Amino acid sequence: YGYRYLLLLTKHEAGELETKMEGSISPLCLRSSSSLCYLSSNVSPDSHRSLGFTLVDSLRPTNFVSLRTGNRRSSSLRLILSPTRGAIRPPTLTAEEVKDVPMPKIDKSGRLSSPRAARELALVILYAACLEGSDPLRLFEKRINARREPGYEFDKTSLLEYNHMSFGGPPVKTETSEEEDELVRHDENESKIEAEVLSAPPKLVYSKLVLRFAKKLLAAVVDKWDSHVVIIEKISPPDWKSAPAGRILEFSILHLAMSEMAVLETRHPIVINEAVDLAKRFCDGSAPRIINGCLRTFVKDRAATSTPQALESKQEVSV
């Protein structure tokens, strides 16, 4: 399979390597409560500077400048490569098939089956597309259809232990060295499971419904990208806009959430809650709170603009 772990580094070693490579390594996912930081190492600094499709004003999946990992917290780094094969098929899932439907974490085939899993997968794909300078839907198909490496085996029991709700939190104080060692072992085990699940072939991890929903989310993002870039420019904080390369994950979460509300018409309390949870899981600092505020502003502005349009339409009909 196309995913291959290249390197496992401590934070100090990663900083040294980052300096040597002059920013050619870019963050794919980061969760402050985990010891893992997934990176994409196949982004060439000179391979995608001609287009202008950007996350905010100068960053977009089809044109991405080389990034740096910055000062984000993580005790270790893992580098992975993306799969290289794929074909495009149009998404077929309707919003009604997944909206507001309670689903178990694992289906009868032993695969992840919750909407949370679909949103998480869509986020990882969208972020990787930004880093690689590729189309999100094409990258999705590449990962879905990539050939497995000979002899590769995926332990499905790891899905039972995989925790979508593992969030960062305040520092934990321990009374003894034994307690400290136990916490370290727990974190390492959780990180190992997370690495195995997120780097496994998607068809082995996710149900068909989840894969279709994830693709539908990505299609919605592509559909609304240009208009949402303008909105994000208005509602995001100045420090994010001044250094957008360091906030690609946060902007990706905003794009996914806004597109799900605008295109799939999922109720905004559900979408905002899911977006905040994704930020808690994969981002650090105040990102969850800021994303919550940005999305609530987006919902408020949409409601304010849609009401006059609805009244105008009614008046035209009556005339």
Image (cartoon, rainbow, N blue to C red):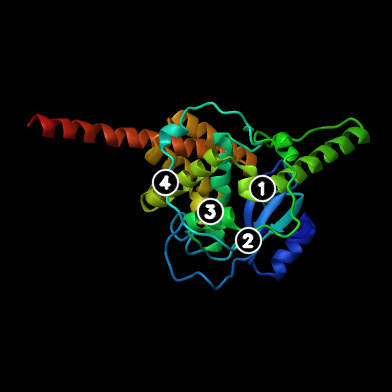
Residue bearing mark 2: 68
Can you tell which of label 3 and label 4 is closer to the viewer?
3
Seen in the image, is 302 located left or right of residue 275? left
Residue type (three-letter) at the residue carrying disc 4: Ala
First of labels 3, 1 by sequence position: 3
Residue type (three-letter) at the residue carrying disc 2: Arg
First of labels 3, 4 by sequence position: 3
Residue bearing mark 1: 198
Q: Residue at x 74, y 65 (%)?
A: 17
Q: Position of residue 62 (x, y in %)?
A: 47, 63
Can you tell which of label 4 and label 2 is closer to the viewer?
4
First of labels 2, 3 by sequence position: 2
Q: Secondary structure at mark 4?
A: helix
Q: Secondary structure at mark 2?
A: loop
Quarter of the rendering containing residue 69: bottom right
- Is there a contact, CB below 8 Å, between mark 3 and mark 1? no
Residue bearing mark 4: 220
Residue type (three-letter) at the residue carrying disc 1: Leu
Q: CA distance from mark 3 to mark 4?
A: 14 Å
Q: CA distance from mark 2 to mark 1?
A: 22 Å
Q: Residue at x 68, y 50 (%)?
A: 200
Towards the viewer: 253 or 170: 253
Towards the viewer: 271 or 99: 99
Question: The C terminus appears in which quarter of the rendering?
Answer: top left
- Position of residue 269 relative to residue 145, above or below, is above
First of labels 2, 1 by sequence position: 2
Q: Position of residue 236 (x, y in %)?
A: 46, 45
Residue 15 appears in the rendering: yes
Towards the viewer: 110 or 264: 110
Quick one: which residue is furthest to the left in this view?
319
- Is there a contact, CB below 8 Å, between mark 2 and mark 1? no
Residue bearing mark 3: 140
